């Protein structure tokens, strides 16, 4: 009988792999056709090289970043985990006039390939998901949005869809020429209004809008460790800069309990009754801490492949000093910060708490107060438990453990140690 369950698992894994292979084969334009740029194929240099047969030259025109040229596109990645403030950081990039921003496109990969296994620790699932994610990110950074269509359900017809995850979070997808529901002066379209008023998303227009922008930024919360991205970071056709966003795991836990009410139901029972349910899924916490530890250890050990491409940001530092931190981020990216980013920070870091209640997934809130509000929401034994489970990463990132309920609730004691994380240059 033992064989039978193994067979079921094998069958399930095989079917995921087959789906993925099918998606790869059926997608219109294999990315690999385009050659790696070099002065020989896409360069500006004249000379004998340009006379060599230039296969794939047309491909170079399809992918603007292949122009081997001083004003290359920057491919920005916000690498984070859910409820760590990544929407906030995403907005800091989304508001910039030269940046095309996408909110978590890997959502579609996950829901297509691994439904119902949102935090799968299964190594094979994880590999498939990562391979697919890297391929998709590579295509999206090249503005090939058609590639994403293979993962959208129902499948888009005539390259239009209503189902792009969080379309409304992307400014370029809610404004002209992609959406004509708003005029050029409607600077800050609400996410809900965008979804309500814009016609179906025309992916051809969206891809054109992406190509026109100087840079592309993508928020990613479904890649567990930065090491998983090495192939992408080293790809000479891309110019990737990773902003790794971290947050106190106690804050992440608290925020998830509030937001994902069904998935974190047992944690709420713990909080309400003071007793830890025996069937609590502890991996909901340990996975965050293990992935942070792995990822941050890699990032901070400064491997050669991340040189000039890595910056670690603590959400708490950003909350305390949004403008200054944002300037540091733009410095690291090598881009001038524009006025609209600054204005967005002014209006969105002083929002009232009422607003934040209305926007469960939103970013409008008093960011500084919000970053530490978990201390008033979690019980001391939950905090104690989290500290024990995550002590290594707390220490590494400079978050102080508390030793009593009094310390926990005394907001005049900061639990965020001053610690400087300089970008790896
Ligand atoms: C580099 O490419 C950009 C965009 O295609 C173009 O505007 C710019 O003039 C090019 N720079 C040089 C030095 O050729
Ligand atoms: C797609 O476009 C074709 C040709 O314009 C049209 O006949 C067809 O109805 C369209 N399909 C959908 C689902 O809109
Ligand atoms: C989407 O936009 C493209 C480019 O403007 C246009 O050619 C195409 O007809 C549009 N598709 C639909 C279904 O309207
Ligand atoms: C909170 O901490 C501050 C600073 O250590 C201390 O002075 C104060 O007495 C504490 N308040 C309470 C209620 O324990």
Image (cartoon, rainbow, N blue to C red):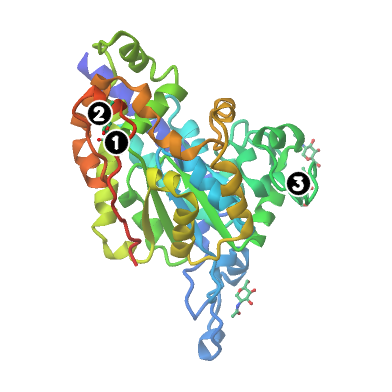
CA gap between label 3 and label 2 equals: 46 Å
Please name the residue that numbered disc 1 is placed on. 413
The answer to which image quadrant residue 255 occupies is: top left
Q: Which mark is residue 186?
A: 3
Residue at mark 2: C-beta within 8 A of ligand 4: yes
**In terms of depth relative to the viewer, which is nearer, 127 or 294?**
294
State the quadrant of the N terminus: top left
Choose the circle earlier in sequence order: 2 or 1: 2
The answer to which image quadrant residue 408 occupies is: top left
Splitting the image into four quadrants, where does ligand 1 fall?
bottom right
Please name the residue that numbered disc 2 is placed on. 407
Residue at mark 1: C-beta within 8 A of ligand 4: yes
Q: Position of residue 347 (x, y in %)?
A: 61, 44
Does residue 16 show up?
Answer: yes
* Mark 3–mark 2 CB contact (< 8 Å): no
* Mark 3–mark 1 CB contact (< 8 Å): no
Q: Position of residue 371 (x, y in %)?
A: 41, 36
Residue drawn where x is 25% and y is 43% of the image: 293
């Amino acid at each position: 009988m033992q064989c039978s369950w193994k067979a079921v698992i094998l069958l399930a894994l095989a079917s995921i792999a087959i789906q993925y292979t099918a998606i790869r084969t059926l997608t219109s334009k294999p990315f690999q056709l385009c050659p790696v740029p070099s002065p020989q194929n896409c360069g500006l240099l004249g000379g004998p090289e340009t006379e060599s047969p230039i296969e794939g030259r047309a491909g170079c025109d399809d992918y603007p970043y292949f122009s081997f040229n001083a004003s290359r596109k920057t491919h920005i990645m916000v690498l984070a985990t859910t409820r760590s403030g990544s929407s906030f950081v995403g907005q800091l990039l989304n508001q910039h006039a030269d940046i095309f921003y996408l909110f978590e496109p890997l959502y579609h990969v996950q829901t297509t390939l691994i439904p119902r296994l949102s935090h799968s620790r299964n190594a094979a699932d994880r590999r498939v998901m990562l391979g697919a994610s890297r391929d998709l990110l590579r295509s999206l950074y090249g503005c090939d949005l058609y590639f994403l269509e293979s993962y959208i359900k129902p499948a888009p017809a005539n390259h239009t869809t209503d189902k792009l995850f969080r379309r409304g979070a992307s400014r370029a997808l809610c404004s002209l020429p992609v959406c004509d529901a708003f005029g050029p002066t409607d600077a800050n379209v609400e996410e809900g209004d965008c979804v309500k008023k814009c016609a179906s998303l025309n992916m051809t227009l969206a891809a054109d809008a992406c190509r026109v922008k100087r840079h592309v930024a993508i928020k990613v919360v479904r890649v567990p460790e930065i090491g998983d991205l090495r192939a992408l970071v080293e790809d000479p056709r891309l110019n990737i800069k990773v902003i790794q966003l971290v947050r106190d795991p106690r804050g992440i836990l608290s925020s998830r309990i509030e937001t994902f009410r069904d998935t974190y139901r047992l944690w709420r029972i713990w909080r309400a009754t003071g007793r830890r349910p025996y069937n609590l899924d502890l991996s909901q916490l340990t996975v965050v801490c293990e992935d942070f530890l792995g990822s941050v250890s890699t990032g901070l050990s400064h491997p050669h492949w991340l040189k000039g491409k890595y910056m670690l940001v603590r959400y708490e530092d950003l909350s305390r000093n949004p403008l200054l931190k944002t300037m540091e981020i733009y410095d690291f990216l090598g881009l001038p910060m524009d006025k609209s980013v600054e204005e967005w920070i002014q209006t969105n870091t002083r929002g009232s708490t009422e607003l934040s209640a209305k926007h469960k997934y939103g970013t409008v809130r008093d960011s500084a107060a919000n970053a530490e509000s978990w201390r008033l929401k979690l019980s001391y034994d939950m905090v104690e438990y989290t500290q024990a489970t995550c002590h290594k990463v707390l220490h590494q990132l400079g978050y102080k453990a508390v030793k009593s309920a009094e310390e926990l609730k005394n907001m005049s004691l900061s639990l965020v140690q001053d610690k400087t994380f300089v970008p790896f240059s």
